[in-house]
Amino acid sequence: MRQDAPIDQESLSVPTERTFIPPAKPIIGQDEQDAVTRVLASGMVAQGPEVAAFEQEFAAALVGGRECVAVNSGTSGQHLGMLALGLKPGDEVIVPSFTFAATANSVAITGAVPVFVDVDPETFTLDPACVREAITDRTVGIQPVHLYGHPAPIDDIVTVAAEHDLWVFEDAAQAHGAIWDGRQVGSFGDAAMYSLYPTKNMTSGEGGMVACGSAEIARTVRLLRNQGMEKQYANEVVGLNNRMTDIHAAIGRVQLQKLPGWTARRQELAGFYDAHLEGVVVPVVRDRATHVYHQYTVRLEGASAAERDRFAAALREEHQVGFGVYYPTPVHRLATYQEDIELPVTEMLAREVLSLPVHPSVSDEDRDRVVEAVNAVARGGA
């Protein structure tokens, strides 16, 4: 799953007298079904006019008009985007460890080296001071993550990159519509990736979008996604099959139109939680940031991982409120990396964070139940 840790399937089947409030819930309605039917009837189901239209509409709506290239997943977008920036074996890319594994995997799969650094304890996003300290003569790029829908301090990161002649690739998988200092994320770096997985703020069923800072980068991504060719059988580079289908693009086009309303609902729910939750540290939003709340992530300050897990279990078992823990194991501690480094903020967050339901399907009654449950469990000291 791109970016989000797998949903606890046990939590989705808890027997209860009350309706279970899931931690995430994709919204696929009649409009999306009609769009798929229209494409199927057209006979053009592979990459075609729907993909081209989706790319243009996404660019206009979310990344300030930057040229966009649709691909089959967010991870593919990261992989191809950084290849287009020239990433090669042995290069180093600075990444946060408090993120989903794909952030680092998309670097490592090329033979390059992800260099893990710490994050800000309030916004959970890449700390520019830590980035600066990690730069070596092998560093070629920085991959900040706009985590949970809150923008990273992207202008400061771009400044650090410019001082050292590095590129910046924005991981905006969770940040559709997020804004930093009046400007849409995904439009700051040399390129950016958005995920379109079902649990994201909008979906195409599965897919990703690469926003490109130049026509040259966009053309290279287009080549790489399509076996290295723009014209059939005229292969220019060694490429892959990472295309998006017209079926997926048609779903994405419908969802894009609904995104502003869904974002407003997420923000409304977050505002209510901010005002009424007790016993937890609610998300911090920087003055220059517009948070789109892919996740509403609280901290249980000072908790151990076991204490956090008991708190979460009480929400599920006693109150039928779902949750997510994103991310319980820092990427640098995963078996695939096992880096012997100390990232104290990342380690702290991995013990303390808990994400509450904030998807647009959460009703006012559900919202009230979430608050009631969190406050009750906090008072009970679970």
Image (tube, helix red, strand yellow):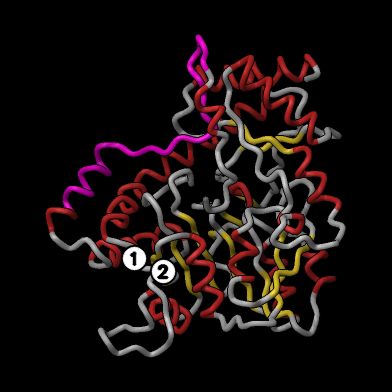
User: Which residue is farthest top?
Assistant: 17
The residue drawn where x is 63% and y is 27% is 273
Magenta span of residues: 15-38
Q: Are marks 1 and 2 in contact (CB under 8 Å)?
A: yes
* Element class at badge 1: helix
Q: Is residue 33 above or below residue 147?
A: above
Residue density around tag 2, few if under 14, some if 14–19, many if 20 or more, within 10 Å:
many
Q: Amino acid at mark 2?
A: Cys
How far across and how far down the image is residue 133, in percent?
85, 71
The residue drawn where x is 44% and y is 63% is 209
Q: Amino acid at mark 1?
A: Gln
Residue ID for mark 2 = 68
Cα–Cα gap, marks 1 and 2:
7 Å
* Element class at badge 2: strand
User: Where's the C terminus, which quadrant?
Assistant: top right
Residue density around tag 1, few if under 14, some if 14–19, many if 20 or more, within 10 Å:
some
Q: Of the residues under marks 1 and 2, which one precedes in the sequence? A: 1
Any mark on residue 270, and which? none
Q: Is residue 43 magenta?
A: no
Tell me which secondary structure the magenta stretch mostly adopts. loop
**Residue 268 can be seen in this image:** no
Q: Quadrant of residue 109?
A: bottom right
Q: Is residue 16 magenta?
A: yes
The residue drawn where x is 17% and y is 63% is 44
Residue ID for mark 1 = 56
The residue drawn where x is 45% and y is 84% is 216
Q: Quadrant of residue 297?
A: top right
How far across and how far down the image is residue 177, in percent?
50, 52
As drawn, is 83 to the left or to the right of 107? Answer: left
